[in-house]
Image: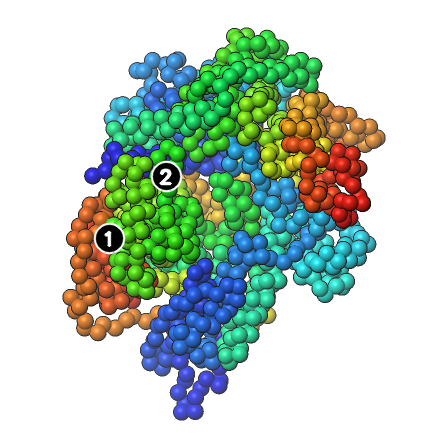
Amino acid sequence: MFNDDPITLEIIQNSLRSISDEMFYTIAKTAMSPIIYEVLDMATAITDPKGELASAGAGIPAFVGALDKSVKAIINKFKPEDINDGDIFITNDPYYGGVTHLNDVVLIKPVFMEGELLAWAVNIAHWNDVSGKSPGSMSVDATEIYQEGIRIPAVKLFVNDEPILSVFDMLTANSRMPEFLKGDLWAQISALRLGGIRILSLVNKYGRSSYVHAVENYLELGQAMAEKAIKALPDGQYEIDEAQDDGSHLSVAIEVSGSKLVIDLTQAPIQSPLPINLSKDGTMLACQMALMGLIGDRQLANGGCFRVLDVKTRSGSIYDVQAPGPCGIYFETMIRLNDLIWRCLAEKVTDTLPSGNFSSICATIMGGKHPDTGLHYSIIEPEIGGWGAGDGFDGANAMFCAMHGDTFNCPAEIAETRYGVTVGQVALNDEDAGAGEYRGGKGVVIDYVIRSDNSFLTCAYTRNKIAPWGLNKGEDGSVNRVEVIRTNGEIEVHAMASEVTLDTDDIVRVITANGAGFGDPKKRKTAALVDDINNGYVSLEYAKAKYGFDVTHGGSYE
Amino acid sequence: MKAVIKEENIMKEGRVKDKVFVTTDVGGTFTDLVYLSEDPKTGRQQLKTAKSDTTPPNFELGVLNVMDKALVDAKQIDVMAHGTTVVINALTERKGAKTALITTQGFRDVLEIGRGNRPDFFNLNYQKPPAYVPRHLRFEINERVNYHGEVTQALELLPLANIIRELEDKGVEAVAICLLNAYKNPQHETLLSNAINALTDKLEVICSHQISREWREYERTSTTALSAYVQPIASRYLSRLHHGLQEKDFSGQLYVMQSNCGVDTLKSAKQVPITMVESGPASGIWGAAELGKIINEPNIIALDIGGTTAKCALISDGEVKITSDYYIEKSHLSAGYPIMVPVVDLVEIGNGGGSIAWVDDFNKLHVGPQSAGAYPGPVAYGKGGTAPTTTDANLALGRINPEFFCGGELKADMASVQTSLEKIAAPMGISTQDVARGIVRIANNNMVNALKLVSVNRGHDPRDFTMVAFGGGGAMHAAALAAELGIKRLIIPATAAVFSAWGMMMSDIRRDILLTYLSPWEHQTLVFINEQMAQLYQELSDEFISENFTSKDTRFQFFGRFRYENQEHSIEVPLPLILNESSIDQVRESFQQLYKQEYTYNLDNEIELVGLHLVGKADVGKVKLAKQQQSGRLIAETIKGEREVDFAEDGVHTSVIYDGDLLEPMMAFSGPAIIEQTGTTIVIHPDQTVFLDEYSNVIVELLKNKGGEHV
């Protein structure tokens, strides 16, 4: 009675979202690595037979548009007759559809019904260690991808639903943490199997043609939504150039034309000998994330949305790296690009975006011997920081950056147990910065007191010299950094560092930036400012200097 | 504290007075009552139910009103159990006390930082939910306990006097104390709390370890802060209720419904009122479990559809699952607030009878999560609602009788319903009937997805389960949902309209202790684990003994929470009260089985213990439900007539309308049919058969059902 009506299509589309979510939670619940189950550095997706993204279940925005690219890489590499029911493919190599860096491992399963390829179920997750020159596989000084771990160049992992044991053995042999690897791998496999079953039962219920029609319709819907968002922007060509921490400059040229958004990155620097390069797919991902920030809707992010986007890169640049360029710390380049597009749009194109935030993954990697168990521990975590203010609201305090999303930080009580460090404080960053009619949100200060000798710190922070950008006379925010406070009182300040040695009672102090302000600070409402002073968000001196706070007329404060 | 038949109840003639149990449940709109009396000699029972309006902010009035309405004499009541929304209301309406927080030096901002997550992640203007305690009311104190529970820095009480003075100046009513690693050693929290009580009697003080003994400082701090926030208001409410009952010469035992499917004593409830937060849903789900025990259905999917939300839970082998992974105001748009107390494991979605249907910019139809609430309510109420709700769609499809709307108390405004559907039909280019069907189908699809989350998603095949549906809208949608999930049998309880109150009547006192306790699972650690378990057991059994329960009245059950080493999420496995050498392998085997059921694979990794969960139950002297008698009424006498009913996917059929209030045990008929009873409408699809069991529960058989999917 019902098969191709709008309600049936919508029910199929809802179901695709539920299936992606169900795959997502399966991984979250069974993964071994905190970076998967707490940071949610992973994603799941269903694509159409051609690899166009139908639905994504993601913990982080950076991965929403990642997986269609991996599927397309499989379609390009394998002949149709070599893609069969019961296969599972695996890749992690940005030069083979891995998109990001070697730690992010993608598993891909074609879903067949009666011999016909109907869909792909796919997921990606960050593995703790895939070998390479440094523990955790990400080092800030790798010069070739070979130093960053095992390259899995889009190969088969399962045939006829049977694992290819030699591939499993090769993977486990190439990790410093093979038990974690096995757990994470099986979590991903289990999610794919489940996704396959769910897709087939959906097709069985509503019929093949309704299913196919629903997917097509869904992509058209995504496209319509994106076109609407782009049409709302004034046509024109916009450019921005921004100085970076290392003294270099990055620029982007954006063209809005009707419902098309063209992002031109051909003026980018040549690819770096350092692992900060993005593959062309990774660059696409950063641009897609910026586009979704304009649309703002997580529910309906699919391949249709991305049809409005045209991204131009230059081969051999940091946005289109060629082998064997290293990519381990790709994420800081990705967030810089995303932030630069955002800034260009916010300063020149639209009023709907807030001012700049701490905008760095602030990847913090620490390891050493657990003082109580004697086992090696490894902390790999992104940090939370201050967000920018917008028109009508103060910036949010202490949130993960734009690349991360429903990501959870690690509780101090768990960190103390698991890693054997002492967490000295988890506090808001009380530095004054980011004044505005609406003020920037607060970053954090977190102290880790190290409890064993010969431990190490590796970190990759940007926005370390160039602070988050204010809008409409709002002040800039403050900067990200890591301090190592030695037992003799000496303080070292780091932003990009590899394997800094830490000994007992050294303190690693993570300090993340306060976000930028929006609007003239002089216009901030007195009541709000008094509240800020009472709560210690703004010091009295800063209130006087930047906000023009008058003690005698400003009302009461404590 | 145990309910015993009091001496004064033995009347002069030597006849023992009826044993009387009453339960009252305060909901958002209505306050429900169930009354059950039993003659101890003959076993003859009387069951009454009643409903009256909820009376915010003085909720106790509604309770006293509904007792009057049901002609219940408070003096005769032996046991009264009470459930209330007072805690959840105070939280969601931000009407709690001015609350302060004291934490370990360096950690006062934890409450505001939360976990840093942003569920609505493409929304760059995302706002964090603001902390219940503002920063200027959050204080730090020097002290430190490490993760082993050893004191590494002594508690410095010197600054406390100044803090207390400031709190009093600022008009603070309640103080939450949450110190780092207090889950492992609460000594400093206790010292601090004692010191505050020695300095002032104007503050309610609550420590984290009194509520939660699990790790994760943000979740524990949030739990403690929210608990302190509702403490004064909830405690005052319970006192007023007790006082009001006493004025009516009530002298029985008063118990309070908790979120863990049990009741607790008035005294305990006043100490930690936050545990009442989900009491309404918990008692309904418990009712489904107990109903299952009475009629021999141990595996149940419970579905409760109310005005604003639908809730569902899975009951496996008669057991409900209790977890401390609970949040309020959490959605795909907001991180919400964690409350780490034992709460029945349920999935809740924003789809109820009042959920509003709307069309987005791309002409896609959606249902909920916005609700028309009690006011203006569905369009059919005629109180000014203009957007159609699920209830309006059910009216338009002939499922609900417009002439018997809200039990005949209201006449449905069908002209306005039609207008509201037209507003959606026009942009979509479909008929109003298709809109009404679409609303019901989408609402059903949303609910099916929620039901899958509690079943297939956790490795349970719904085809092995019986569905029990209740709440105002449960019976209207359940038959379609059961069909879709491949469920073969659906039960609409006789007391579906007041099912939370009925479930309370079936509850024991229940206390859950959840403790974070990390240990390798091996022979060498067994002795320490046993020590810890014995200590927990002693703690809870001493508590019961101090309340005059004997060992005959109490039952205990242990669970261990296990995971593969280094995993995060754990699975609960039943443990014996005392472990022996063979427990190591037995538990490992159970873990492997349960793990595989839920996640489809096993590893050969070691498993580790992450926590212990002790459940203690004490009998309050429940009445065993008696079977109902037949009057000899004929089925034909229960038929009200016929009408056209639109069953959406199952077509339009002329259907017999039964008067549910007249149906009796052993009556049987088949669909398509509608059963109209006061407070609920039951929709029976074609090919489904109905019979009434000995307790007048409506049993719907879906024998031809071929729906469902593999786990």
Q: How is the image coloured?
A: rainbow
Q: Amino acid at mark 1?
A: Gly
Relative side of A273 to A481, left or right: left
- Which one is nearer the viewer's eye here, B223 or B349? B349
Identify the secondary structure beneath mark 2.
strand
Is residue A54 in sight in this rendering? no
Q: CA distance from mark 2 to mark 1?
A: 23 Å
Given the image, what chain letter belongs to the residue carrying mark 1? B
Q: Position of residue A230 (x, y in %)?
A: 46, 24
Q: Which one is in front in this view, the residue at disc 2 or the one at disc 1? A: 2
Instruction: State the residue position of label 2.
Output: B359
Relative side of A273 to B628, left or right: right
Determine the image quadrant of residue B165: bottom right
Is residue A468 in sight in this rendering? yes
Image quadrant holding the N terminus of chain A, namely: top left
Residue for point 51% across, 31% down: B122
Q: Position of residue B570 (x, y in %)?
A: 51, 43
Residue for point 43% across, 65% down: B53
Given the image, what chain letter belongs to the residue carrying mark 2? B
Q: Earlier in the sequence, mark 2 or mark 1?
A: 2
Relative side of B110 to B537, left or right: right
Q: Amino acid at mark 2?
A: Val
- Which one is nearer the viewer's eye here, B155 or B61? B61
Vertical relation: A379 (above or below) B647? above
Instruction: State the residue position of label 1.
Output: B398
Badge 1 density bin: few <14, some 14–19, many ≥20, Cα 10 Å: some
Q: Kindly indicate whether the residues beneath marks 2 and 1 are on one polypeptide chain.
A: yes
